[in-house]
Amino acid sequence: MANEILVSVANVVLRDPTTKAGIAYGKFNISNAFNITMSNTDVRAGIDAPKIFSYYHSREVAISIKQAVFTETIMALNLGQTVSTGAKTVLQTDCVDLSASGSGVITLTPIGNVEVFLSDGSIQTVTPVVKNITISGAASQSVMAIYETSKTADQITMETTTPPSIVDLTLVAEIRSSGQSTPTKYLQINVPRFQVAGNYALDMAADGVSNETLDGAALESSSSDCTTGGYYAKITFIPVTATTTYSSIAAIPSTIAWAKSTVQSTQISVLGIRGGVYANTNITTDCTFARSGSSGSGITVGAATGLISTSASATTIAETVQINVTYPSGSLVDYVRINIT
């Protein structure tokens, strides 16, 4: 087993779960967490109730992503909302230097009255004339004017009952071998249906910067075939170089029985075997096929396809024909024998 290490944090890709349209791509993450948990129920029976079985159930996949940058996306996903853009009513604050007569000009056109905070702590409500304001008893002062105005801006409405969003989430991280500075593999964790938790905290400090967190859990995705059950995520290890090392290969079928003087054809399939927890891989297209020796001279072998065929006139005698299967460049070899009877 290679000394491989998962380094640093993952990049995050968020997409629409149905259309796969992009929502966000995060490269400035502080931390990522991918946690799998299960519950279990013990079955106990007999004298002194020994445990005879443990039933594991309720698997959950939880993901937490903390990022350093501040965007509208994380908040919108937690609120289950889109970000609207247009003319929005916002609060404007201006520092205004008043003249000797107590008049001044604010920056933008207000909607309604202007609240003016004076240096002595008092507050006056002033009705503006377009952008002009006049404050009694405040000659030559600097005051703070606060008022509502209209600006083109992005806005998220925090509704009371809207559930958080469901997105397609993918984490992309680097795997390196010890002593190497470049990745040997990339780890991709794809959750087709990620339910955002809806818990959002925006912490602001005088001596620091804010962080945003996207928490949530995987929802079941349906399989597209009858052999695979519903799933939460697919975890893929992508090698930087496309070479996979197999311990052996297996050509299927290993033995073929053909009756002589008949038209025959058989497709050979080849499995690459790695052993351990690794499933066998179909590597037929990566192998080469050739007839061994002089027997079966009328048999045609697809060197790159593994399709064996013959005509009726080519197998008129009983004999055994061997097909050599190699992967790659002869490093691994298996055989298929054709018994013509």
Image (cartoon, rainbow, N blue to C red):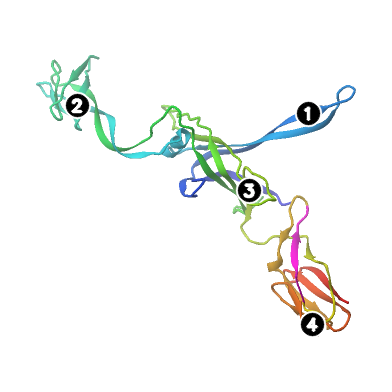
Q: Is residue 71 visible?
A: no
Which of the marked residues, 2 or 3, is nearer the chain's N terminus? 2
Disc 1 marks which residue? 42
Q: Quadrant of the C terminus?
A: bottom right
Q: What type is the residue that disc 3 sits on? A: Ser
**Residue in view at x 49 percent, y 42 percent:** 28
Disc 2 marks which residue? 96
Q: Is residue 46 visible?
A: yes
Which of the marked residues, 3 or 4, is nearer the chain's N terminus? 3
Give the image location of residue 281, x and y in percent: 72, 59
Give the image location of residue 321, x and y in percent: 84, 77
SS at badge 4: helix
Give the image location of residue 39, x and y in percent: 70, 31
**Residue in view at x 82 percent, y 70 percent:** 335
Q: What type is the residue that disc 1 sits on? A: Asp
Give the quadrant of residue 244: bottom right
Which of the marked residues, 1 or 4, is nearer the chain's N terminus? 1
User: Can you tell which mark lies on residue 312?
Assistant: 4
Which span of residues is magenta-colored? Answer: 264-275
